Image (cartoon, grey):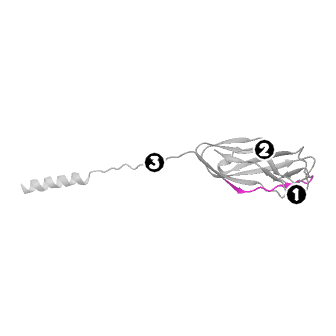
Amino acid sequence: MKIRLLAATALTLSFTASTTMAADVDFTSTLTNSCSLTAATPGLMALSADGTVLGSQETGGVAAAVSVLSIGGSTLTIGAPTTQAAPAGYDATNETVEVAYTGTGGLGTVSQGYTSSQTTVALTTIPLSVLAVNAKVTNPDSFTDGDYTVRTVVTCS
């Protein structure tokens, strides 16, 4: 009888020791469309050799840099550029104000030649990337001494 009891106990222990346990491990996340912009570097315009173009791609000029991060679908809008400030005596009658831009990183396929119109770019999820924005004012009547400011408004929605 003792041998049967020991055999039954050993059999029970062997079945108990080989039982497999399982547990579900879940991961969840909730994402909402969002986009953030930072004007990282302001631009600087310089005068062309012939005196008819004031632009960031002229010698001594610097493109502005805007940092962009997008989660989900967003629209990047680059507004029509405007002259915000010019010195007294400057004749803006024949001027043309334009911007152009190119992207790097997740914006690597984004490129727009000079335009005076508003433009838009459809975005998907992209890592932190940079949009390099150039501006120029063309005026066949030339420029007068003083401070000039050109502005384009970049939005992401």
Q: Please give the name of the residue rendered at 75% of the width and 48% of the height, measured from the top-left corner.
A: 152
Residue at mark 3 to residue at mark 1: CA–CA distance: 58 Å
The kind of residue tagged 3 is Thr
Which secondary structure, mark 1?
loop
Q: What's drawn in magenta, residue-wise? A: 38-50
Q: Position of residue 29 (x, y in %)?
A: 48, 48
The residue under label 1 is 146
Disc 3 or disc 1, which is closer to the eye? 1
Residue 70 seen in this snapshot: no
Mark 1: give few (<14), some (14-19) or many (20+) Cα within 10 Å: few
* Residue 52 shown in magenta: no
The residue under label 2 is 113
Q: Please give the name of the residue rendered at 93% of the width and 47% of the height, measured from the top-left corner.
A: 141
Q: Check the image and report above or below for 114 versus 17.
A: above
- Quadrant of the drawing holding the N terminus: bottom left
The residue under label 3 is 28
Q: Earlier in the sequence, mark 2 or mark 3?
A: 3
Which secondary structure, mark 3?
loop
Q: Please give the name of the residue rendered at 74% of the width and 41% of the height, measured from the top-left corner.
A: 118
